[in-house]
Amino acid sequence: MDFTPETGTITMFSTTWCGYCNRLKKQLDAQGIGYQEINIEEVEGTAELVEKLNGGNRTVPTVLFPDGTAATNPSAAEVKSRLAA
């Protein structure tokens, strides 16, 4: 399954209990940055994808950008900057 987001948006891999994920979602919402949230505990194969993107660590939030690159626990400012690039 391809989780690469459309231009101008991100895919955020998260869990329901992740405080960092909830904080990032609130910040993205406040800045009007679009995202698709994928709960790695509910979508088969995504926990393994997150581990692959993070050198074997199951760390969330992991954000996937339209250019195929990823960032682990980025700030909203970093997300906005990378989307503008």
Image (cartoon, rainbow, N blue to C red):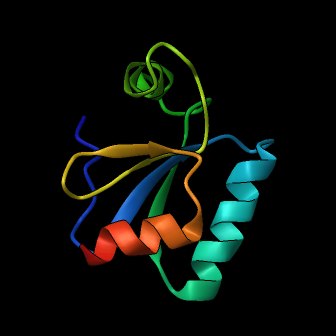
**In x, y percent, where is residue 3?**
30, 45
Q: Write the residue at 31% across / 55% down.
A: 65
Residue at left offset 68%, top offset 52%:
21
- In the image, residue 58 above or below residue 43: above
User: Where's the C terminus, which quadrant?
Assistant: bottom left
Left or right: residue 19 compared with residue 77: right
**How many labels, in total?**
0
In the image: residue 59, left or right of residue 1: right
Against 66, residue 32 (above or below) is below
User: Where, quadrant-wise, is the N terminus in this rendering?
Assistant: top left
Please tell me which residue lies in front, 55 or 9: 55
**Residue 64's spot in the image, x, y percent?**
36, 49
Percent position (x, y) of residue 49? Answer: 39, 25
Question: Residue drawn at (23%, 66%), measured in percent from left and top?
Answer: 6
Q: Position of residue 27 (x, y in %)?
A: 66, 74
Q: Residue at x 59, y 47 (%)?
A: 73
Q: Is residue 62 above or below residue 78?
A: above
